[in-house]
Image (tube, rainbow, N blue to C red):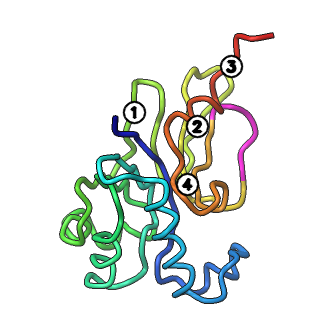
Amino acid sequence: MPDVFFTSDHHFGHKLIIDFESRPFANVQAMDEALIANWNAAVGPEDTVFHLGDFSFLGLEATSNIISRLNGYKILILGNHDRGRGRCWWLEAGFDEVSEYPLVYRDFFFLSHEPMYMNKHMPYVNVHGHIHGQKYEGNNHFNICVEHTGYKPLSFAAIRDAVTVSEEG
């Protein structure tokens, strides 16, 4: 049975992100290849991946090449570094679906690039990227940036289990 995965902020082709976020890669080529390998080790061909933005800093041909190498049905929610190119560019690059706005998943999870305003009384969870190594306190936000997930997509089941209050004492 196919699984659903979430991830964000790969920054393919962005050399400076290695230093900005202390990523454990020698250079941008090593980073890009490791991110592709990690994605494909987690995601099968029939799975779905929601990418929550800031996918690539490369041109159309190089970005398309990377997308074609990644397993799964790929849905992109545009991040701040993606929006300058627009939906059509990303569809042409190879994403199966592209959204300019946050999406609601299973009536409970708000999927966005930037964290959304949430307070402790709201019964929802915002799965987001954008803030890389930082993390918000509480169970209303789940930062899916690759820096928090071992540089690979994380399954919906893992996110659900992390934010669901246990009934066991």
* Rendered image quadrant of residue 145: bottom right
Q: Nearer the viewer, residue 84 or 137?
A: 137
Instruction: Rate crowding at label 1 as few (under 14), some (14 to 19) or many (20 or more) other CA atoms within 10 Å.
Output: few
Residue found at the far right of this picture: 169
In the picture of the structure, the residue carrying the numbered disc 3 is 165
The CA distance from mark 2 to mark 3 is 13 Å
Magenta stretch prevailing secondary structure:
loop
Give me the residue at 47% from left, 77% from top. 12
Q: Is residue 169 left or right of residue 150?
A: right
The CA distance from mark 4 to mark 3 is 22 Å
Q: Nearer the viewer, mark 4 or mark 3?
A: 3
Question: Percent from the top left, x then y, of residue 158?
Answer: 58, 37
Give me the residue at 68% from left, 19% from top. 165
* Rendered image quadrant of residue 55: bottom left
Earlier along the polypeptide chain: callout 4 or callout 3?
4
Amino acid type of the residue that numbered disc 4 sits on in the rendered structure: Gly
* Range of residues picked out in magenta: 135-140
Earlier along the polypeptide chain: callout 2 or callout 1?
1
Q: Secondary structure at mark 4?
A: loop
* Rendered image quadrant of residue 69: bottom left
Instruction: Check whether the beta carbons of the residues at disc 4 and disc 2 lie within 8 A of each other.
Output: no
Quadrant of the image containing the C terminus: top right
Q: Nearer the viewer, mark 4 or mark 2?
A: 2
Q: Secondary structure at mark 2?
A: helix
Instruction: Check whether the beta carbons of the residues at disc 4 and disc 3 lie within 8 A of each other.
Output: no
In the picture of the structure, the residue carrying the numbered disc 1 is 105
Q: Is residue 125 left or right of residue 96?
A: right
Residue 129 disc label:
4
Residue 40 sits above or below residue 60 on the image: above
The CA distance from mark 1 to mark 3 is 19 Å
In the picture of the structure, the residue carrying the numbered disc 2 is 158
Give me the residue at 50% from left, 79% from top. 32
